[in-house]
Amino acid sequence: MFLINCPYCGERDQSEFSAGGEAHIVRPKQPTELSDDQWAEYLFMRKNIKGVQFERWNHSHGCRKWFNMVRDTSNDKIHAIYKMGEKPPIK
Amino acid sequence: MSRNLRITNNKFIDQTSRISFKFDGKTLYGFKGDTLASALLANDIHLIGRSFKYHRPRGIMTCGSEEPNAIVQAGNDASMTEPNTRATEIELYEGLEASSQNCWPSVNFDIGAINNFFSPLIPAAFYYKTFMWPANFWKLYEYFIRKSAGLGKSPTQPDKDIYDHRYLHCDVLVVGGGISGIIAAKTAAKNNLNTVLIDDKNNLGGTTIFQQNECFKINNSYSNEWLKKEIETLNSIKNLTIKTRTTLAAYHSYNYLLARENLTDHLDLNERKDKIRQRLWKIRAKKVIIATGAMERPLIFNNNDRPGVILSYSIKKYIDYFGVKCGQKISLFTNNDSAYETAISLSNSGVSVNSVVDIRDRTNSLIVQQAEKLGIKIHWKSAVVNTNGYKKITSIEIMKLSDDDTTVVGKKIKQECDCLGISGGWTPRVHLFTQSGGKLKFRDEDNVFLPDKSELDQISIGSCNGDFELDSVVKNSVISTNKFLKVNNNDYENLKINSSNEINKKNIWLLPSNKPLGKTKPFLDFQNDSTANDVKLALREGFKSIEHVKRYTTTGMATDQGKLSNMHALGIIAETADVKMGELGTTTFRPPYTPLTFGAIVGRNVGEFFDITRRTPMHDWHAKHNAEFENVGQWKRAWYYPIENESIHEAVQRESKAARDSAGILDASTLGKIDIQGSDASEFLNRVYTNAWSKLEIGKCRYGLMLNEDGMVYDDGVTTRLGENHYIMTTTTGGAANVLGKLEDYLQTEWPELDVYLTSVTDHYATVSICGPNSKKIISKVIPDLNLSDKEFPHMSFRNALIDNIKCRVMRISFTGEHSYEINIQSSYGKSLWEKCFEAGKEFDITPYGTETMHLLRAEKGFIIAGQDTDGTMTPVDLQMDWIISKKKYDFIGKRSLYRSDTIRDDRKQLVGLLTDDPNVVLEEGAQIVLETKKQPIEMLGHVTSSYFSPNLNKSIALAVVKNGKKLKGQKMFVPMKNKTINVTITDTVFLDKENKRLNA
Ligand SMILES: [Zn+2]
């Protein structure tokens, strides 16, 4: 059960948050121009790696804000937290 | 009458406070401070239970949480009885009743014991291999296996005790109140760190507190006396909280820990009333110091499981702490120095020690010299090769080890004894460290796994970190704690410590025997009854991974999680497979460290507090009018309102007819309501709904369908334009929170440029829905000022209104197909408004109806319920709702998915109406629909999603999803049921008033 430093509220218990899958997948601006395969790539394909992963999280039982997190899934270490729209502070 | 096995001069047990208790129905006596195990031993009772597979007699083997054998059913009545408790951990209280668990019909005569004589036929995985086939015999097998396996009895009555959860935040958490933990806790607290020290026993002090021996001194006092003074100083230290009887159950990442505090289990029954039994502490610690000590290992040799075979240091604790002699003539068998401490303690208490059998060559450490001075006989380089006795050990057989230790040689010496103490060295308790994700390293010199790398802010100190000598324990604990806490505490700087240090170390995982392996029973896992032979068999059968061997032989899989057996299992596997132990790795220890009660896990979240219950403002009215309620998410919704002895069917038929014949009233307050404001509100709705919203006039309502990005229907509801930049959206009752979450997600992450604000107002408004041909008359009575003409207030429009000067919103919308109004008013007025409408409707026999009637009425009109007629695989096209998909909009959520190769398939399941050939037969929801009943396997073409008997049409109607259903109108199909096949015909989804005339009636 980790502690998450919400960029709007500060450090809170994990139970206040929900995970929202891989980060930085941008919804295509012109979906109609995509082939089935291209659309399926956006729609279905998500990474689930052991190691450092870029994720979306929501402070669902708090301020309800979405933000991004860089987390190592092998040890749950959080390397960075940054707001939506911001560039990841680490590669 | 049993012999008196108590010694008198004892510091820890109050021998003036006699306590009576019952074991297996027999009344016995012990003292306050006893555990059930120590009290039983004092009564000369060793035989506690039967082993799991062979039903061999088993006795108390340890004095702590690692106990594998003395597993009992504790507690007196059907609400508080608890299976699988360890006699070594139960504190004795007046009135305790406990019984042997794994035996049938009794511990002294056990039917399953016949397994013991057949044991060559019951190797590892016997149950897996034998009882697999034929599958339908399993019912028979299971009865006997369960009956004779004796896994304890669950309570049959609700638990009357109170349990609690609390949070605890601290700078430093010290786990374990032995000498290391006390040093660490004191150091932390004295340096202004908010410190918590927990220990699972009722007293602090660990094993040192009863270590009164010439060889172990601190500043010229016995180590136990020095420690006692240290403990006394703890009370005066600020910042230090001490919790005894508190077991650390789980250690998670981020230093989040769970500890279970026992508050009343040690009290007499009459002192427990209204007290909290157990409390689960949810601890967030900035730093954690693990000082959980070490566990003594058994030795693995033939018949090492008889009652009376006890770990050597436990015998020492029973004599030195509890004042209980485990026997009158005790033999000891060891591979290390600690058994000599036991021998000396016994000798000093007047118990005769037959001899110490030591597998090592002669060694002359201080403690051994002291034992020899006391005249204790030692068999060097020898091993116990067998034990005799059935319900209790009566003698042991000793032989010399060969030069290379692989066999035994010479003459067998038989030695009579009534107790055998065994010591196979020490295993650091690294369970919590590994639970927290820490990695272990292996120390070859004494075969122990030690804490190595951890991601967390924590250390292990004392014997759980591999320090086993008094001087190294103290010195290293002081150094490590100072370094870890970045403090410089000099309380312990100049301690003078005397310690007997072990010189000679030797270990043999499986001791040699004078018999071939197949003829012996060297037990590894006492609780699950697996022997060294089973592990070797598993290796012969090709299992290589320790995790697989463990599951195949069930070694380490009992309620003790193999605390005693794991090391030997690993050692034997490594030896047999010829790999290094350090490379073999170890199994993963999972929380909880010791079993937790369900009560402690759920805490206060029981009964009505198990989940939140949401009630509408009109709830009391429904209850008063005899409503039955249905759970919809967390809401309690009025389901139907039976009059007198009406069945649900009768009530729903009456309500449904009344709603169409005159007037019905429904509490629709639970529908989700989201207030949408902002200059881009219209654009936002365009993007989230399938239809177009920009041209919706202010004051108009529109039905919308919301898809997931995969094109599947997600939710639906009516949205009303209240102003230029202001809408109110309704969602399904169950979907409200998810819809809001989803909309927020898109707003915040995909379209942050949109000026839109979402607010959930579900709880802020109560909603009264009135439908039926007389609804207009009723509304005109309730709101006389409102012009209700079809021209001024047409279907799908909204008006602000005042009722008794209270602002409300009136929508003319319909989910029943009837002329219908919905009034939304501030929640606090919900009940008055409802009563007012009901009063006004009395002359029209207004009938309150519940969710069941609502479902029936909408089904007559073919309106879907998202979540009932859709299941996450239905597109709007599948629902035959093509009309709601805007062709003009460039994009909306899910649009692109509507023409994926999969979503444009003809043979998708599509929503259709279904009529039974016999109008009186009502289909079962979920029933399968087929075209062909002869050919097997029968192809399932679809299923019934909604089904009712319509009183307004006087026939059975149903909605269903059927493959290619759109093109099958008029097709005869079948619904095969258990005893009959029902003939059906596919129809249109709208059964009643296809022209929508009733909306304006
Ligand atoms: Zn927040």
Image: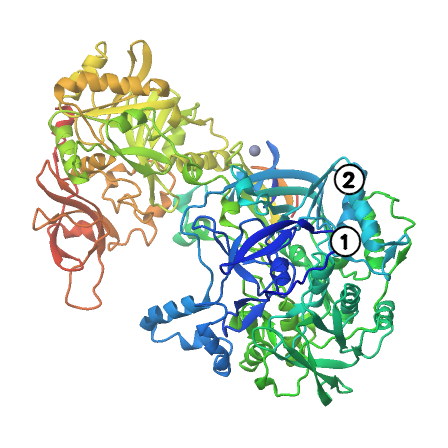
Residue B67, percent from left and from top: 61, 62
Q: Secondary structure at mark 2?
A: helix
* Left or right, B318 with reference to B759: right
- The quadrant in which the C terminus of chain B is found is top left
Few, some or many residues within 10 Å of mark 1 (<14, 14–19, 20+): many
Residue B603, percent from left and from top: 51, 42
The residue pinned by badge 2 equals B189
Q: Does the image show residue B728?
A: yes
Which is nearer the eye, B821 or B31? Answer: B31
Residue B876, percent from left and from top: 28, 43
Amino acid under label 2?
Ala
- The quadrant in which the N terminus of chain B is found is bottom right
Q: Nearer the viewer, mark 2 or mark 1?
A: 1
Mark 1 and ligand 1: say if the CB distance to the nearest ligand atom is below 8 Å. no
Q: Secondary structure at mark 1?
A: helix
Amino acid under label 1?
Ile
Which is nearer the eye, B385 or B898? Answer: B385
Which is nearer the eye, B158 or B631? Answer: B158
Q: Which mark is residue B813?
A: none
Which is nearer the eye, B721 or B774? Answer: B774
* Left or right, B673 with reference to B279: left
As measured in the structure, the alpha-carbon distance from the residue carrying label 2 to the one carrying label 1 is 21 Å
Image point (34%, 27%), residue name: B616
Q: Does the image show residue A24?
A: no
Pointer 2 and pointer 1: residues touching (CB < 8 Å)?
Answer: no
Residue B815, percent from left and from top: 22, 31
The chain holding disc 2 is: B
The residue pinned by badge 1 equals B209
* Left or right, B190 with reference to B552: right
The residue sitting at the bottom extreme is: B410
